[in-house]
């Protein structure tokens, strides 16, 4: 799919995504975390739409929603995060849970994010909270890709224990 | 020769139309493209049922008319490309190749961070690129 | 003695991602900033600040992976940025030119620029320096190796020029400070 295409150092992407979070969560909307989340998610949404167009160019047509979700879990995740989703669950009523046991963008944060004294007191919760803001963009990516592929949905994320996380997709009827 | 290429969005909204016929036929092409939309979904489902898997995107001849032919191509994001030609003897392979190049150009224009999905495409770069693709039709 | 293509070696030494993912993410972010700020100058500033914050972290990565020794002269520094820095991170090279008389100011002309792939600026973005993040990155990185600089775009193809040219100016060598600050 990607033979001969251009590459850049991963640290460039890491730099941009981390600064995106710092800009919106810490500088622009530090008192309005929901607004910051929406802005970052919107950025992810646009990229997700564009990547869906690009990554589905040569593949056979999807026959149902489940196939699209599987595409996200396998090909899409591999292109973006260099691995596949580890576990896919569904309640067969339009809710899908995608588990990544080692989400790439969460593997860095314990090294880079400074913890405030109150955060350091409750490290598991703190880590989950600190990590949460790095999931707005991937949620947007998923929602953008799915929406462009004909699956309107809402996407949220949860961190159980770093660096594992889950993305919850709720398909809109 | 290629008379017209068009792009129609997911909600059957017109996104792009470029005429190469050199006349005042643009309205006629809008009409032709509009009429072809019904055939799209029909053709896509027929191909699925017959199990044709090679490049699902290309839907082949949508409908022939007296002095032109209309071909269709639908992306996985359900965006439709329409090609109207006056040449009645074109090879399927050439048309498929055309659509693939056109698809690549479409992907690039939608990759512009300032592109607005659903809005008409007005990019001069895209227009030029399409002209090039059209003029090299049938060549490797 | 530097190897024949130190930039290539450095680039091979790091993890890569598809450039499109990076290009699209950067572009979507610039677009969102423009929506949020409406003032193009503000966005230019934000991009520079973001670049600065990235640069101060990137330098460690660079020094450890690029196998370069500390540069004693600014002339050497500019060369390293052009041939190794840009190559290692963006996979492209730049040419150094137009030095001033005392070698404190020069131009870096990029031979390619992945940030601008697919980008077509709308009319409403007059005054935007789309790639301003790069100015901040270089300034931040150099500050970490004790050089205070000013980095600006002299030519920008998205603004109608014929090349991407940065103007790099050394303001002063900063004395090495004790790394632990009392206040923060």
Image (cartoon, rainbow, N blue to C red):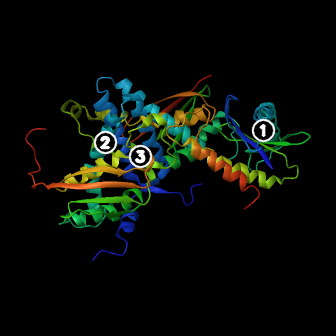
Crowd rating for badge 3 (residues with CA inside 10 Å; few <14, some 14–19, many 20+)? some
Task: Assess whether mark 2 and mark 3 are in contact (beta carbons under 8 angstroms).
Answer: no
The residue identified by callout 1 is: B44
Label 3, label 1: how far apart the Cα atoms are: 38 Å
What secondary structure is found at the residue carrying circle 1? Answer: helix
- Please tell me whether residue C91 is drawn above or below residue B65 in the rendered image: below
Tags 1 and 2 on a common chain: no
The image position of residue A77, as x and y in percent, is: 52, 45
Label 3, label 2: how far apart the Cα atoms are: 22 Å
What secondary structure is found at the residue carrying circle 2? Answer: helix
Instruction: Give me the chain letter of mark 2.
Output: C
> Residue B80 has which mark?
none
Front position among marks 1 and 2: 2
Front position among marks 3 and 2: 2
Task: Assess whether mark 1 and mark 3 are in contact (beta carbons under 8 angstroms).
Answer: no
Horizontal side, residue B71 vs residue A72: left or right? right
The residue identified by callout 3 is: A104
Number of labels in the image equals 3
Report the residue at 53% width, 30% height from top: A169
The residue identified by callout 2 is: C50
What secondary structure is found at the residue carrying circle 3? Answer: helix
Instruction: Give me the chain letter of mark 1.
Output: B
Crowd rating for badge 1 (residues with CA inside 10 Å; few <14, some 14–19, many 20+)? many
Horizontal side, residue B39 vs residue C36: left or right? right
The image quadrant of residue A122 is top left
């Amino acid at each position: 799919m990607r033979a001969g295409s251009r590459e850049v150092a991963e640290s460039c992407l890491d730099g941009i995504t981390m600064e995106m979070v710092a800009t919106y969560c810490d500088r622009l909307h530090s008192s309005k975390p929901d607004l910051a989340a929406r802005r970052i998610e919107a950025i992810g949404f646009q990229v997700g739409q564009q990547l869906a167009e690009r990554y589905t160019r040569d593949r056979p047509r999807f026959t149902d929603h489940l196939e699209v979700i599987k595409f996200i879990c396998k090909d899409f995740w591999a292109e973006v995060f260099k691995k596949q989703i580890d576990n896919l669950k569904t309640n067969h009523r339009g809710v899908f849970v995608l588990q990544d046991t080692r989400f790439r963008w969460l593997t860095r944060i314990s090294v880079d994010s400074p913890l405030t004294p109150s955060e350091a007191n409750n490290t598991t919760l703190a880590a989950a909270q600190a990590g949460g803001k790095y999931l707005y963009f991937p949620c947007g990516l998923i929602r953008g890709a799915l929406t462009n592929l004909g699956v309107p949905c809402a996407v949220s994320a949860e961190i159980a224990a770093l660096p594992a996380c889950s993305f919850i997709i709720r398909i809109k009827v | 020769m290629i008379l017209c290429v068009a792009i129609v969005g997911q909600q059957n909204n017109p996104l792009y139309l470029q005429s190469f016929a050199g006349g005042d036929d643009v309205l006629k092409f809008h009409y032709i493209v509009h009429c072809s939309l019904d055939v799209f979904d029909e053709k896509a489902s027929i191909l699925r049922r017959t199990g044709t898997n090679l490049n699902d995107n290309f839907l082949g001849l949508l409908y022939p008319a007296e002095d032109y032919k209309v071909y269709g191509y639908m992306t996985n994001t359900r965006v439709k490309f329409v090609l109207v030609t006056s040449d009645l003897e074109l090879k399927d392979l050439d048309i498929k190749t055309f659509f693939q190049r056109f698809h690549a150009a479409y992907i690039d224009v939608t990759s512009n961070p300032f592109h607005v999905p659903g809005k008409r495409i007005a990019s001069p770069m895209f227009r030029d690129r399409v002209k090039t693709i059209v003029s090299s039709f049938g060549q490797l | 003695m530097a190897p024949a293509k130190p930039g290539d070696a450095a680039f091979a030494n790091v993890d890569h991602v598809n450039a499109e993912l990076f290009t699209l993410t950067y572009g979507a972010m610039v677009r969102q900033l423009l929506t949020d700020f409406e003032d193009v100058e503000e966005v230019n500033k934000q991009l520079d600040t973001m670049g600065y914050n990235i640069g101060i972290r990137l330098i460690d990565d660079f020094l450890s992976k690029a196998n370069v020794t500390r540069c004693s002269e600014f002339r050497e520094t500019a060369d390293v940025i052009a041939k190794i820095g840009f190559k290692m991170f963006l996979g492209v090279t730049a040419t150094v030119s137009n030095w001033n008389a005392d070698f404190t100011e020069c131009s870096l002309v990029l031979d390619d620029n992945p940030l601008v792939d697919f980008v077509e600026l709308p009319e409403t973005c007059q005054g935007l320096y789309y790639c301003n993040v790069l100015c901040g990155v270089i300034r931040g990185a150099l500050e970490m190796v004790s050089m205070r600089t000013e980095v600006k775009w002299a030519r920008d193809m998205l603004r109608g020029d014929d090349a991407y040219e940065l103007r790099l100016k050394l303001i002063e060598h900063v004395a090495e400070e004790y790394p632990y600050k009392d206040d923060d």
